[in-house]
Image (tube, rainbow, N blue to C red):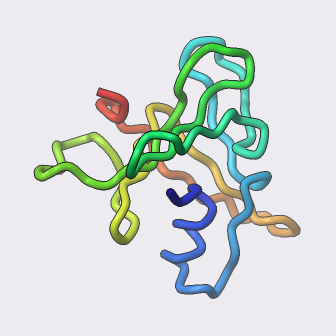
Amino acid sequence: MPLVSELLTEVAAGKVAAHEHELWTTCPKCEQKVHLDEAVVDDSVPFETSYACPHSCGTMLVVSVPGPVLWEDSGWRAGDWVIRNVRDLYWQQDGTQRLFVLRAREHALD
């Protein structure tokens, strides 16, 4: 299953490459900033990659196939996948001042 960085690179049509260490979010439980390369990644569930807080708080965001109906405020479509982030997801490419933000989706982990 794909990582968030792979999906963002694909969406950018290869013009820029995203890396897990350039992406971060905040744990919804402990409120700590977590770069995605520090998160616990689990791709053992078919068609899903989950990112958990390294402090054992639980899931922070999920990449999955879309359901039969993409319900409102549940995630961001990236090709054949959906990035489901309950907190804002930030991307700042190394060496740049530009900051890209995928706004939190209230029902991302429902």
- Viewer-proximal residue among 77 and 47: 47
Residue drawn at x 61%, y 24% is 27
Against 98, residue 31 (above or below) is above
- Image coordinates of residue 87 in percent, x first then y, are 50, 33
- Viewer-proximal residue among 8 and 80: 80
Residue drawn at x 45%, y 49% is 63
Which image quadrant: the C terminus?
top left
Left or right? Give the position of 107 relative to 12.
left
- Viewer-proximal residue among 5 and 46: 46
Against 98, residue 48 (above or below) is above
Residue drawn at x 54%, y 30% is 60
Residue drawn at x 44%, y 32% is 86
Left or right? Give the position of 62 relative to 80.
right
- Image coordinates of residue 10 in percent, x first then y, are 53, 77
Against 105, residue 6 (above or below) is below
Toward the right, the furthest residue is 95
Against 31, residue 102 (above or below) is below
